[in-house]
Amino acid sequence: MPDATVPPSLPPEFGVYFALLEVSALVQHGVEGQLRRDGGLSFVQFQILAILGEDPSSPRSMTDLADRLVHSKSGLTYQVDRLEQAGLVVRVPSKHDERGVNVTLSPQGVSALERVLPGHVDVVRDVLVDALDGADRVELTRLLGGVVQHMRSRPPRSARRSGAGGAEE
């Protein structure tokens, strides 16, 4: 892959940023068709199901999901509404917060996730994983893990207030 093109007004080290944006967009584009075809899911809906599928016995709060997905709470509510209408998730009141709502996979949600995952793995391998040898995969995972850790060390989006410059959602 050639070096990412950086506008002349930006420092050359921004090439990493533009390369990451392009790879992210290409991977997302590559998987969206498969998710729609195999499960009738949007990319965000798949992300919600995948997070809930990490531990199906443990419901997640809407705030936790929004922070994890870096998605607006209103946008997440819309997506969870759609998943609930399709019978793929269930919302229950939080046991720890009287105003809170938790989300968990329904049995149909587990089935949907099981149905889309094999094709999803194939597409991700094709568009991303197979472009790297084993050592590069390990190194890229390590590097991106450090970036994630740095970014997640800041207060979660739900704990931050938007400034005078505009809303965060």
Image (spheres, grey):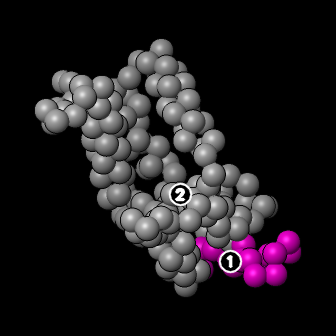
Which residue is situated farthest in the front direction here?
Answer: 164
- Mark 1 is surrounded, within 10 Å at the Cα level, by few (under 14), some (14 to 19) or many (20 or more) other residues, namely some
Residue 80 rendering spot, x and y as whole percentages: 56, 75
Quadrant in the picture for the N terminus: top left
Residue 134 rendering spot, x and y as whole percentages: 47, 18
**Residue at position x 56%, y 32% in the image:** 145
Q: Is residue 104 left or right of residue 156?
A: right
What range is drawn magenta here?
Answer: 87-102
Which residue is situated farthest in the top direction here?
Answer: 135
Element carrying mark 1: strand
**Residue at position x 30%, y 48% in the image:** 25
Q: Nearer the viewer, residue 57 or 139?
A: 139
Task: Evaluate whether residue 86 shows in this view.
Answer: no
| Amino acid type, residue under disc 2 in the picture | Leu
Image-quadrant location for residue 35: bottom left
Residue hosting label 1: 90
Task: Evaluate whether residue 5 shows in this view.
Answer: yes
- Mark 2 is surrounded, within 10 Å at the Cα level, by few (under 14), some (14 to 19) or many (20 or more) other residues, namely some
Residue 32 rendering spot, x and y as whole percentages: 35, 57
Residue hosting label 2: 69
**Residue at position x 72%, y 72% in the image:** 102
**Residue at position x 86%, y 75% in the image:** 95
91 shown above or below 65: below
| Amino acid type, residue under disc 1 in the picture | Val
